[in-house]
Structures are given as C-alpha cells and as structure tokens.
Amino acid sequence: MRTADQVKRKYHELASRKQAIEALYEQAGAEARPELQAQAERLEEQLLLLEWVLNAPMGSYHG
C-alpha cells in the first residue's frame, strides 16, 4: 500500500505531464492532436482515481 505522500507525488507528476501534453496539443498539427487528446484523457482518469484515494469517503456507509 502506498503512503499518502507517495500518492501525492504521483498525482503531481501526472498533473505536470498532463500540462505538458496540453501545451503540445496547442502546438501540434491536426494529425497529432487525436493521440495527444487520448493521452490527456487517460491522465485525467488516473488523476481522478488518485484524488479519490487521497479523499476517500468517510462515514458508516463507506466503512
């Protein structure tokens, strides 16, 4: 199991990678954009999962 610090580091790593891909997307030609969009969407999904891990639901229903 990963520690909260490890999860946070991974989150920040993925977030910076997503920003780099978004910057490339702006500069890329039409032929490269679908691939970059797909990469950005995968990173977004991973970021959402890590956010859920960091902010896990609390309460008797989730316990």
Image (spheres, rainbow, N blue to C red):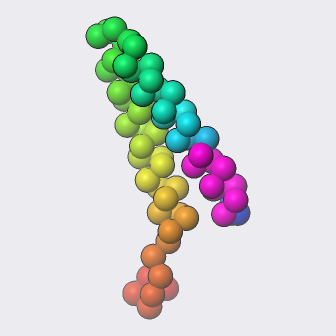
Using residue 7 as the reference point, say whether residue 61 is left or right of it. Answer: left
Quadrant that contains the N terminus: bottom right
Please say if 62 is above or below 14.
below
Residue pictured at 48% horizontal, 47% vertical: 46
Q: Which residue extends farthest bottom? A: 60
Please say if 27 is above or below 42.
above
Nearest the viewer among 21 and 2 is: 21
Residue 21 in the magenta stretch? The answer is: no
Q: Position of residue 63 (x, y in %)?
A: 49, 85
Using residue 31 as the reference point, say whether residue 17 is left or right of it. Answer: right
Q: Which residue extends farthest left? A: 30
Nearest the viewer among 62 and 54 is: 54
Q: Based on the displayed image, in which of its 4 quarters is residue 13 positioned?
A: top right
Q: Which residues are magenta?
A: 4-12
Please say if 43 is above or below 47.
above
Residue 9 in the magenta stretch? The answer is: yes
Q: Position of residue 54 (x, y in %)?
A: 55, 64
Q: Position of residue 29 (x, y in %)?
A: 34, 8
Residue pictured at 48% horizontal, 34% vertical: 18
Residue pictured at 66% horizontal, 63% vertical: 4
Please say if 26 is above or below 18.
above
| Magenta region, main secondary structure | helix
Q: How many marks?
A: 0
Q: Position of residue 25 (x, y in %)?
A: 39, 20
Residue pictured at 56% horizontal, 37% vertical: 16
